[in-house]
Image: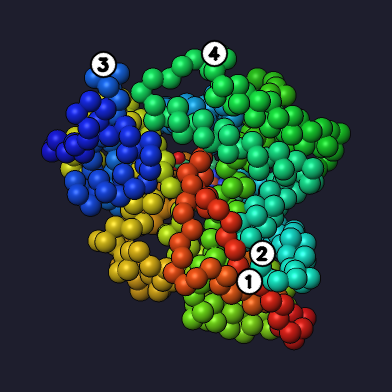
Amino acid sequence: MRQVPLVVGHPLLGSLKELRHDVLAAYLRARSTVGDVVRFQAGPPGARTEMYGVFSADGVQQVLASQSANFRKDNPTYTEIRESVGNGLLTSQDDEYIFQRRMVQPLFTRRRVHEYAGAVHAEIIRSVSGWQTQPDGVVDASAVMTEFALRAVSRILFGADIEAAVDVVRRQFPVIGESVLRRGVSPVRLPRTWPTPANRRTQAAQRELFGICDRIIAQRAGADEADDMISLLVRARDEDGSGLSADAVRDQVLIFLLAGYETTATTLGYALHLLAGDAEVRARARAEVDDVLAGRSPGAADVEALPYLNQVLKETMRVYPAVAIMGRRAVAEAEVDGFRIPAGADVYLAPWVTHRHPAYWARPDDFDPEHFTPEAEAGRPRYAWFPFGGGPRACIGQHFSMQEAVIVLAAVLQRFDVEAHDPPGRRVPVDLGMALRPAGPLLVRVRPRTKEAVA
Ligand code: HEM
């Protein structure tokens, strides 16, 4: 087994500054200058932490799938998420995880996901209804898709309308995200109970979010026969017949909000932004939508019949993977892509980097849906593209999200011409919280199409 090469950093602080300043750029640089499996050191001598980056498709496959039992969610970032958001399906492990997964799985069967299509369509129509009368036609795709994603996940999964909570969630999740990220990479973590300004901000955010979840749960109280997530969780019993505590139900709701809304909002916001910026791709996508739907509203059965729209989405998730980095901790020493990873190592995988690896992509830096023709897909290793993770802990919302996104894009393209507002080629900088998101608005220009496009 080979030793993992070190990314040489500052003599005193190692790579701390680079990782804190722009972790995505630091990883990209490390991949191109050092290699597919790298080691970073961060922090002053005596308080120095070490972390590993694994960027090759084979390495990713080993960590997430074939050696998944050895790579657990015991790393600093997941520990932080668990402590600030709670122990739900995204963060739990072992028996607790198995119990929780069994509990919520019925919500994600193929049949159930198909049933959600109507609600997704109704919500997107509601979200874009204001576009008809937008005076200059310029809208922030990111803001619209954030509201859409929140309403969709809460209505579909929780059976609740959280109109009043949209603002709190939008304001407070980033506060938690910033804290998770800062503490996750910091070599020195002060106890959460210390009244530092940062701790106080995080606690206030947590209190407000808990309040929102408690209200969502209260809306469902008494809905005995319902089969939304909250009703399932409230009725759940484990083997000894005991139910979940109110805190455990709230943790699950918060984790699903966290995992489900920002990821979707980022993906859809960027999809519209990228479509707006590429007239050729847009024309082809729109022609497919008009051809297949012939004015009908898109439904679950249409998703597979829109292959080009699927390509556009996959390419959007390649360029802007909403989960740009994911971490694990090695239990025992392991061999990953031929390198020795020691027991206890913090290992990071980065779709952001692997999705730009020149070994797998013809035009790594460009938006080009041709990367996802069936032939191109067949010629690539499975884990060159992994926006939904993989192995036993892959995203439970994957099929739901793909269906949702295709329906949303089809419905928007049917009704509107979506064109660039920004100068050609402008890339909106990204911001990394718990999910990747645009650092500013994603402005696009929308013009209602003639009535014939929609029945
Ligand atoms: C484009 C949208 C989405 C993306 C890119 C995405 C991405 C991911 C990724 C990468 C993971 C694995 C994390 C890891 O291995 O460390 C994950 C897990 C998860 N996602 Fe998603 N997700 C999306 C949408 C959703 C939605 C809509 C929901 C809920 C309805 C959801 C719920 C979850 C949950 C609960 C997990 C943990 C699953 C488990 O460990 O069993 N996600 N997601």
Return the residue at label 4: 194
Residue 305 on image: x %, y % = 57, 75
Query: What residue is shown at x 57% (from left), y 66% (from top)?
Result: 272
Query: Mark 3 or mark 1: which is in front?
Result: 1
Residue 125 on image: x %, y % = 75, 65
| Amino acid bearing label 4 | Trp
Q: Answer yes or no: do the residues labelled 1 and 4 have beta carbons within 8 Å?
A: no
Return the residue at label 3: 46
Element marked by disc 1: strand
Sequence-wise, which precedes: disc 1 or disc 4?
4
Residue 48's place in the image compared with 425, above or below, is above
Sequence-wise, which precedes: disc 3 or disc 2?
3
Element marked by disc 4: loop
Q: CA distance from mark 4 to mark 3?
A: 23 Å
Query: What residue is shown at x 83% (from left), y 40% (from top)?
Result: 225
Q: CA distance from mark 2 to mark 1?
A: 6 Å
Query: What residue is shown at x 24% (from left), y 19% (from top)?
Result: 45
Q: Answer yes or no: do the residues labelled 2 and 1 have beta carbons within 8 Å?
A: yes
| Amino acid bearing label 2 | Val
Q: Quadrant of the N terminus?
A: top left
Q: Quadrant of the C terminus?
A: bottom right
Q: Answer yes or no: do the residues labelled 4 and 2 have beta carbons within 8 Å?
A: no
Return the residue at label 1: 445
Return the residue at label 2: 139
Sequence-wise, which precedes: disc 4 or disc 2?
2
Sequence-wise, which precedes: disc 2 or disc 1?
2
**104 sits to left or right of 57:** right
| Amino acid bearing label 3 | Gly
